[in-house]
Amino acid sequence: MKKYIPDAITLMNLLCGISACVLAMWGQYVPAFLFLLGSVLFDFLDGLFARLLGVVTPLGKQLDSLSDLVSFGLAPALMAFNWYLYSGVGHTVFAYAAFFYTCCAALRLARFNIDPEQKTDFRGLAVPAAAMILAPLLSFAQVCDKQGTSSFVTALLDKQWFLPLLTVVLGVLMVSRIPMFSLKGKKLSLHRFPMETVFFIAFIVIVLPLAVLHGRTVGAGFFYTVLPLAIVFAFVLYILINIVAAISRRGPQIDEQL
């Protein structure tokens, strides 16, 4: 019986993702984002229980990727697609850039399952991380609209080019080969895990205060404003740290070749 527990948890991830897809098409971005938070939780728990129970299986690995494609590849894309169509921009070809994101997520997940280099860290942006930039951003923007509050987020989303560009950039980052650290099973240590430690320190000192200060101006409560902003800022910071680290590692290699 215990071998079915991780798969059952994975299916809960899938159910949350399906619910988020439906809500996204209804234009309910806040509850869609909350269901995606549920997907994140179940995505973490299925792997944890599989390791604790000693029932890691090839079936579970494939099921996890299929569930992640729906939850983190399709649902955020539908949120972006629907937002673009009904935000005043209208039905244009740029709205379909959202599904480029989905295709890149599918490629990223398929490659992850067969790539031995991604056992401890990642090559390219993880699909859940990309989703946790796109989905909370749109959730926060909808709260701002309902509250009648202006924000730099809504100002950016009002630009015709911003949302298509964001989905394309996130898609490219997912299929890139940029080394990106994983936070699983790591402790703070500047010597052993310098990037991870810098990330946590910067999040606490810079990102979290910015999210609190800006989120409070909307006046809709911590859970609907500060939390989405903190998640977006955290993963943007995560991407920037990894890109800077990749460039710094690349520099000495180029010098050696010359």
Image (tube, helix red, strand yellow):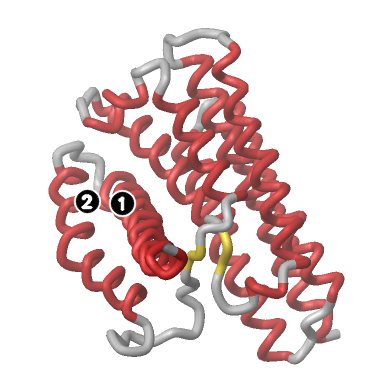
Q: Earlier in the sequence, mark 1 or mark 2?
A: 2
- Please tell me whether residue 170 is drawn above or below residue 97 in the rendered image: below
Answer with left or right where residue 183 lies relative to residue 245. right
Residue drawn at (67%, 90%) of the image: 52
Q: Percent from the top left, x then y, of residue 23?
A: 59, 35
Residue drawn at (64%, 49%) of the image: 71
Disc assigned to residue 192:
none
Residue drawn at (25%, 28%) of the image: 147
**Residues at discs 1 and 2 in contact (Cβ within 8 Å):** yes
Instruction: Tell me the crowding category of disc 1: few under 14, some 14 to 19, or many 20 or more residues within 10 angstroms, Cα based.
Output: many
Answer with left or right where residue 103 lies relative to residue 84. right
Q: Nearer the viewer, residue 157 or 113?
A: 113
Dividing the image into 4 quarters, which one contains the N terminus? bottom right
Determine which quarter of the picture holds residue 177.
bottom right
- Please tell me whether residue 153 is drawn above or below residue 96 in the rendered image: below
Q: Nearer the viewer, residue 134 or 147?
A: 134
- Circle 1 residue: 233
Q: Nearer the viewer, residue 236 or 128?
A: 236
Label 1: which secondary element: helix
Dividing the image into 4 quarters, which one contains the C terminus? bottom left
Answer with left or right where residue 145 lies relative to residue 80. left
Residue type at mark 1 is: Phe
- Please tell me whether residue 145 is drawn above or below residue 111 in the rendered image: above
Q: Percent from the top left, x then y, of residue 218?
A: 20, 37
Residue type at mark 2 is: Ala
Q: Nearer the viewer, residue 237 or 50?
A: 237
- Circle 2 residue: 211
Residue drawn at (62%, 81%) of the image: 48
Q: Percent from the top left, x then y, of residue 195?
A: 34, 73
Instruction: Tell me the crowding category of disc 2: few under 14, some 14 to 19, or many 20 or more residues within 10 angstroms, Cα based.
Output: many
Label 2: which secondary element: helix
Q: CA distance from mark 1 to mark 2?
A: 8 Å
